[in-house]
Amino acid sequence: MIVLAASLGACGSSRGDRALSGGAIGAGVGAVGSTIAGGSTLGGAVVGGAVGAGVGALTDKDDINLGD
């Protein structure tokens, strides 16, 4: 699940956009994954959101082809 969140964590044209979208996507994926695995939904959302936001903020727009 973290790999999925990380791969989607860089949607956006600016560093802030990528951090926000990565955090939102990561929180959703983390919450669902944790719930499916029998863990804490809130805990999964927090961890997924942190990972997604971090990856989004660290990803450079030149690393990802966002199309025209």
Image (spheres, rainbow, N blue to C red):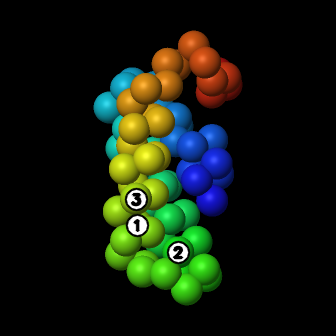
Residue 50 visible? The answer is: yes
Q: Find numbered disc 2 in the image and state the secondary structure of the residue it sits on.
A: helix
Report x, y in % for residue 37. Answer: 60, 80
Where residue 47 is drawn, which disc sits there? 3
Q: Which residue is mark 2?
A: 34
Q: Earlier in the sequence, mark 1 or mark 2?
A: 2
Residue 28 visible? The answer is: no
Q: Which residue is mark 1?
A: 45
Q: Find numbered disc 1 in the image and state the secondary structure of the residue it sits on.
A: helix
Does residue 58 appear to the left or right of 46 in the view shown? right
Q: CA distance from mark 1 to mark 2?
A: 8 Å
Sort mark 3 into few (<14), some (14-19) or many (20+) by Cα contacts within 10 Å. some
Sort mark 2 into few (<14), some (14-19) or many (20+) by Cα contacts within 10 Å. many
Q: CA distance from mark 3 to mark 2?
A: 10 Å
Residue occupying the point 57% across, 13% down: 62
Q: Earlier in the sequence, mark 3 or mark 2?
A: 2
Sort mark 1 into few (<14), some (14-19) or many (20+) by Cα contacts within 10 Å. many
**Of the pair 11 and 67, the residue shown nearer to us:** 11
Report x, y in % for residue 57. Answer: 39, 30
Asked if the residues shown at circle 1 and circle 2 are in contact, with their CB atoms under 8 angstroms apart, the answer is: yes
Quadrant of the snapshot with the N terminus: bottom right
Amino acid type for the residue under numbered disc 2: Ser
Residue occupying the point 53% across, 75% down: 34
